Amino acid sequence: MELLLLFLSFCFLTLSRLTFGAESGTPVTTVTVKEDDDVILPCSLDTNVNIEKMLFDWKKEGTVPQKEVFMYVEGKHYNNGLPGQDEQFRDRVSHFPEELKYGNASIRIKQTRLEDKGNYTCDFPRLQPETKIFHIELVVEPVLKVRNVPGAAPEPYVTILKDKGLLQCKVPGASPKPTVEWWDSDNKTLPSKMLQDKAEQGRFYVTIQTTAPKPGCYQCVSTQMEIWHRISSEICVPEVSGFSAVWVIATVVFGLVLFGAVVLLSILKAKGYNCNKGTPEATNHSSNESQHLNQASKPPLNE
């Protein structure tokens, strides 16, 4: 009895697998790629038969009619004159000509976009004794970048308010609401003070401030995760080196000393002081001694 039940269970499972396979057809192959990267969608006949003189057609499901991605017909294809390719894939899809003799009909999509995600089919409609269709699901993982879409925040407006490094950032008219942050050169978030956070007619206006901890370059970053939009602006706080600081101080001190010297000389000159001949008293004394020596040197007059 137990053997009979085991046999019936085996038959049931076998029939279930056959029914599932008949309903679903070729298994779906899932391919994952990051946005903007190139991706290869696999499609290859198991028999390794040469398909250079065959027809295979790549389509993207989800629209009526389906979008034509890439078609190859006995050497003719969308990249050498064959018409009919959907505009979304124009100049972005290629195949591997050297692999056709091995039954490889895979394609490469350059710089994937978010709209490329979805289900694709690779069809061999003339294959004998029966046609064969491969199913591929493409998953495109979005990345944060600058996007030209409605509501995307414009480039932040950044300014230095004081010489001490008070930085201000304004992000106007964004929707959905952005997250605004100040980052240092290592992309670390700085503590910020919120000055403005208001909404007008469905648009958000955000203003924040931070103090630069040291000279260097900083960027204000606006992020909208809902639309995968990120944009930033950079501003640099100038660095005053130790040598420059000493030079500035020395220049100021020298200027003050020079100014004081000029003022002192002006006062002494007003009192009759002569830098070259000395004080007035010394000058008169020197003049009298000169006259006395001159008289002494003269020979006596004959009487």
Image (cartoon, rainbow, N blue to C red):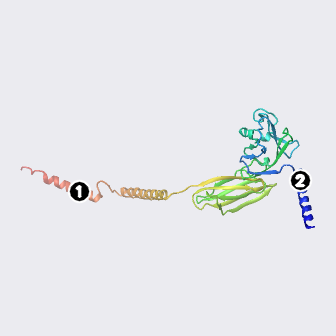
Considering every residue shown, the one lying at the far left of the view is 303
Q: Amino acid at mark 2?
A: Leu
Q: Which residue is mark 1?
A: 286
- Label 1: which secondary element: helix
Disc 2 vs disc 1: Cβ atoms closer than 8 Å? Answer: no
> Label for residue 65?
none
Name the residue: 68% across, 63% down: 193
Name the residue: 82% across, 36% down: 84
Quadrant into which the N terminus falls: bottom right
Comparing 144 with 137, the one in front is 137
Comparing 147 with 260, the one in front is 147
Comparing 13 with 181, the one in front is 13
Q: Is residue 151 visible?
A: no
Considering every residue shown, the one lying at the far top of the view is 81
Q: Which residue is mark 2?
A: 18
Q: Nearer the viewer, mark 2 or mark 1?
A: 2
- Label 2: which secondary element: helix
Residue 285: percent from the left, percent from the top? Answer: 24, 58
Crowd class of label 1 (few under 14; some 14 to 19; many from 20; radius 10 Å): few
